Every structure is written in C-alpha cells, then in structure tokens.
Image (cartoon, coloured by chain):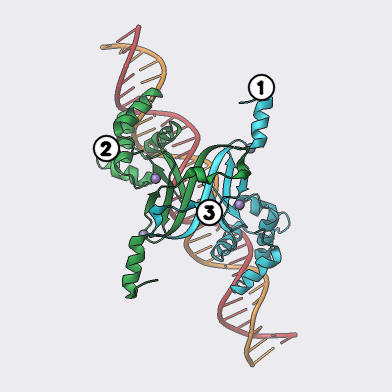
Chain colours: A green, B cyan, C orange, D red
Amino acid sequence: MKPSFEELKEKLKQRNIHLSYQRLRVLEYLVQNRCHPTVEQIFSDLQKSISTLSKTTVYNILKILVEAGVVRVITIEDYETRYDIEVENHGHFKCKSCGTIYDFNINFDLLNSADLKNFKISDKNVYFKGICPRCLSNINETNEVKGD
Amino acid sequence: MKPSFEELKEKLKQRNIHLSYQRLRVLEYLVQNRCHPTVEQIFSDLQKSISTLSKTTVYNILKILVEAGVVRVITIEDYETRYDIEVENHGHFKCKSCGTIYDFNINFDLLNSADLKNFKISDKNVYFKGICPRCLSNINETNEVKGD
DNA sequence: TCCCAATTTGTAATCATTACATATTTACAA
DNA sequence: TTGTAAATATGTAATGATTACAAATTGGGA
Ligand SMILES: [Mn+2]
Ligand SMILES: [Mn+2]
Ligand SMILES: [Zn+2]
Ligand SMILES: [Zn+2]
C-alpha cells in the first residue's frame, strides 16, 4: 500500500512504458494528491507549471497508467470520473455534503458470494455514500442541537 | 425483493407521484426487464409502442423514480449509466466479455468498516468485473483446451 | 547529425445529458 | 359539461466530458 513514486517508476519501466516528462508529472501528481482527483483537477493544477500541457495528453496518460495497472478508475457518480494511485483493494465513501471521497479498509475476503462461484473476478469496487463526520458535526452546530 | 408492478404503483401513490401513462410504462418496462437497461434501451424499446415518446421524458421519469426510491442508478462504467428496479442491497457483476450485468447476494452486514464508525451511510454499492461462466466456457471451447 | 518512431499538442467531432420553451394532459371548480 | 391553472410531456438547442485525428515535437539509435 502507499506506493512510492520510485516504486511506480520501476513498475512502469518493467512494462516498457517510457517515462516521459508529462507521464512522470502526472504520476507524481497522483502520488501527492490522493484525493481521487478528476481529469480537470489534474490538468488545471499541472498546467500551472507545465504551460504547454494539453488535456488530451492527460487523458492519454491516465489511460496508459490504468492499463498498466498503477492507477484505478473510480466511478461513484455517473457525472464524474476520478483516478486513484492506490490500486490495492479498499472501499470508497463519498460525502454527499462536501463531496470528499474517503478511503476505508474492508475485508474483501468476506465479500465472497456463492452466486459468483463460477465467475472469474478481476475487479472489485465498493462505493458508499452518505455524510462524513465533519459535515455531520457542522449540521449539528448549525441546528444548535446536540445528538441525532 | 422482486417488487411487483402493483406494489410499486402503490409506493408512488403514497409519495404523491402522479401515475401518468408514460411513467407507468417506464415502470412496467423496468419490472419486466431486469437486465439493468440504459436510457437508450428503455427509450428505443418503449418508442416502438409509444410513438410520441421523447427521450427527455424518459430522463425526467427516471430521475423522479430514483428520487422516489423505487429505482437505483448503476455506475459500473463511467461511459454508461444503468437503471435497476431492485433497490434492496445486492451486488453487481459485469462481464467484460459479453457486457451482461449479473445480480449477486452478499451479506452487507459484514461490510462494516471500523474506518466508517462516525459516518452516516445512506447508499452501498458493490461492483465486480470479470468473466461470466458462459463466456468462460466459450473461451475454453474456442481454445479446445480443458481447464485453466 | 540524421531519421524514425513515440509522444504530445490543438482542434474538431461525438455523444450522453441537461436546459428550456412550447404543447398536451390532468385535476378540479363553476 | 366547460374553463382554467398546474402538472406533465415533447422537441430542439445547449452543454460538457471524452475521443478522434492530423500535425508538431521530442528522443534515442545509426
Ligand atoms: Mn482510494
Ligand atoms: Mn441489480
Ligand atoms: Zn462531508
Ligand atoms: Zn459474459
């Protein structure tokens, strides 16, 4: 878990993926910004320091990184695709109030279903939605009421 | 589970949602087609018998049904939104080969994570991907090889 | 240095979804 | 039954994310 930039570079080299400047910067961005950013966030942030960057390049690179297995796609909402540098199994919780996506650990071994006995499973995603503790306490403060 | 058309109509009445002809036909379609159809599938199939139907209407109705809690949105892939008349907790498996989305039962009580102790959870989605038994056997036949 | 292939870039095309104005239907009172 | 306002449906235009594509740039080996 928590793959380092160096480990990821090594993994890409092993898969014969050339480490161009743009690819390294996108990879570095994802390592440093584990908030599950959108393409727009990655592009607009990186463009500040790479003025020639094209959004098409960001799309291309993300596709390559996903195919290489070092990035995973998060589709909690049908209107926004997000990207995660952590590819090991973990759950995602999206707060409906502030929009933050939290990681959480769950025992994926307990997720076995007899119904899938003869299926070959290659990807597992667990998406929850609700209200995060920070927003819950804000709501309580606003209402000036203690408890639920 | 397996909500009947009549039960769903009753549920909508209770929520003061007028049962217009188009709404009933979309509801009926979802009850009869539990393959998790896309808007395009619902629209093009229904248009055969409702020639004046508008795709905007299908979008509007699905939005209302989702808000009323009788339909759930499935976002396994970022490029296609699907709809499910079964809103009780269950998992979804998408076959990467044939595209079929299968339902499967899992014990959602086991899905608790200590990390979410103070979170208010309102929606739980479990999405798996892989190859279904039918496609697995087709692949084996094609290769004329037994076993994996 | 020169050349070829990989990579990046910018623009145009695609396509699902939404916005919005108009048409139709429904509910209900007179 | 008729009139009227609100709800619902329709059709078209606008939006916005993603992809397609051709041209420009880069980088490594001969
Ligand atoms: Mn994550
Ligand atoms: Mn289902
Ligand atoms: Zn929050
Ligand atoms: Zn299949």
Q: Is residue B20 visible?
A: no
Q: Is residue B54 visible?
A: yes
Point out residue B99 in the picture as x, y percentages from the top left corner: 61, 40
Discs 2 and 1 carry the same chain letter:
no
Residue at (63% x, 73% y) in the render? B13
The chain letter under disc 2 is: A
Label 3: how many Cα within 10 Å (few below 14, some 14–19, many 20+)? some
Q: Amino acid at mark 3?
A: Phe
Label 1: how many Cα within 10 Å (few below 14, some 14–19, many 20+)? few
Label 3 element class? helix
Q: Amino acid at mark 2?
A: Ile
Q: Which mark is residue B108?
A: 3
Question: Real-space Cα distance between discs 3 and 2?
Answer: 45 Å
Pointer 3 or 1: first along the chain: 3
**Which residue position holds label 1?**
B145
Q: Nearer the viewer, mark 3 or mark 1?
A: 3
Residue A140 in the figure: left or right of residue C12: left
Residue A107 position (above or below residue B4): above
Q: Which mark is residue B88?
A: none
Q: Quadrant of the C terminus of chain B?
A: top right
Residue C6 position (above or below residue C16): above
Looking at the picture, tell me which residue is in the foreground, A80 or B31.
B31
Q: Which mark is residue A50?
A: 2
Q: Nearer the viewer, mark 3 or mark 2?
A: 3
Residue at (40% x, 55% y) in the render? B116
Q: Quadrant of the N terminus of chain B?
A: bottom right
